[in-house]
Image: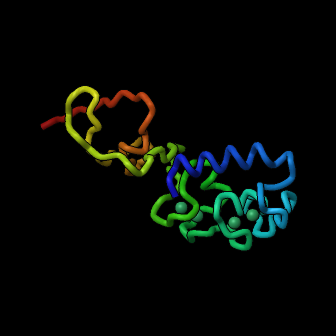
């Protein structure tokens, strides 16, 4: 699922929860969390996750954790970064070159939590990369 779509669903769900349910889904119960993942039945339906399975994609992070850390709960290859980075890669980036205004190709760096992080997960944010080399 596209990250922007996931965010839209989370915002929509948060806006609709006070009303009791997601639109067109009268059967869901906003007070029900049968699988104990911290995501109520209406939010599970909106996100497309399984209301009877705490970890829908089986990656070791439950659905509530993944929605909170902006990780895709339907993609077992994407998990929460230990340092808390959000997965902002919109899924449609294409590296076009190194010039100002171009999108640089995606690459992986290791963060302070000693975990590989994709550059494109910082899409839409401003960051300073401090790179050094020694021989
Ligand atoms: Ca749940
Ligand atoms: Ca679930
Ligand atoms: Ca998961
Ligand atoms: Ca996942």
**Which residue appears at 35% of the width and 46% of the height?**
93
> Between 49 and 111, which is closer to the camera in this rendering?
49
Drawn side of residue 86 relative to residue 123, left or right: right
**Which residue appears at 78% of the width and 62% of the height?**
25
What colouring method underlies this structural image? rainbow
Q: Position of residue 124 (x, y in %)?
A: 44, 34
**Which residue appears at 57% of the width and 48% of the height?**
70
Drawn side of residue 10 relative to residue 109, left or right: right
Drawn side of residue 56 relative to residue 43, left or right: left
Residue 3 versus residue 125 in the image, above or below: below
Q: Position of residue 5 (x, y in %)?
A: 56, 50
Residue 130 versus residue 119 in the image, above or below: above
Quarter of the picture containing the C terminus is top left
Q: Position of residue 43 (x, y in %)?
A: 73, 57
> Between 13 and 88, which is closer to the camera in this rendering?
13
Q: Position of residue 67 (x, y in %)?
A: 63, 52
Residue 122 versus residue 47 in the image, above or below: above
> Between 78 and 3, which is closer to the camera in this rendering?
3
Query: Quadrant of residue 105 in the image?
Result: top left
Q: Residue at the front extreme?
A: 24
How many dots with numbers?
Answer: 0
Query: Quadrant of residue 40 in the image?
Result: bottom right
Drawn side of residue 24 relative to residue 121, left or right: right
**Which residue appears at 68% of the width and 70% of the height?**
50
Q: Residue at the left extreme?
A: 135
Quadrant hosting ligand 2: bottom right
């Amino acid at each position: 699922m596209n990250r922007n779509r996931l965010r839209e669903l989370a915002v929509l769900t948060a806006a609709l929860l006070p009303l009791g349910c997601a639109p067109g889904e009268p059967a869901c119960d906003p007070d029900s969390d049968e699988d104990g993942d911290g995501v109520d039945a209406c939010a599970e339906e909106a996100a497309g996750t399984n209301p009877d399975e705490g970890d829908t994609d089986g990656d070791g992070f439950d659905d509530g954790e993944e929605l909170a850390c902006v990780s895709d709960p339907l993609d077992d290859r994407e998990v929460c970064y230990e340092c808390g980075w959000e997965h902002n890669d919109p899924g449609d980036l294409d590296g076009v070159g190194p010039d100002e205004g171009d999108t640089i190709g995606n690459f992986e760096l290791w963060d302070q939590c000693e975990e590989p992080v994709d550059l494109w997960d910082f899409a839409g944010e401003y960051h300073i990369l401090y790179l050094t080399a020694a021989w």
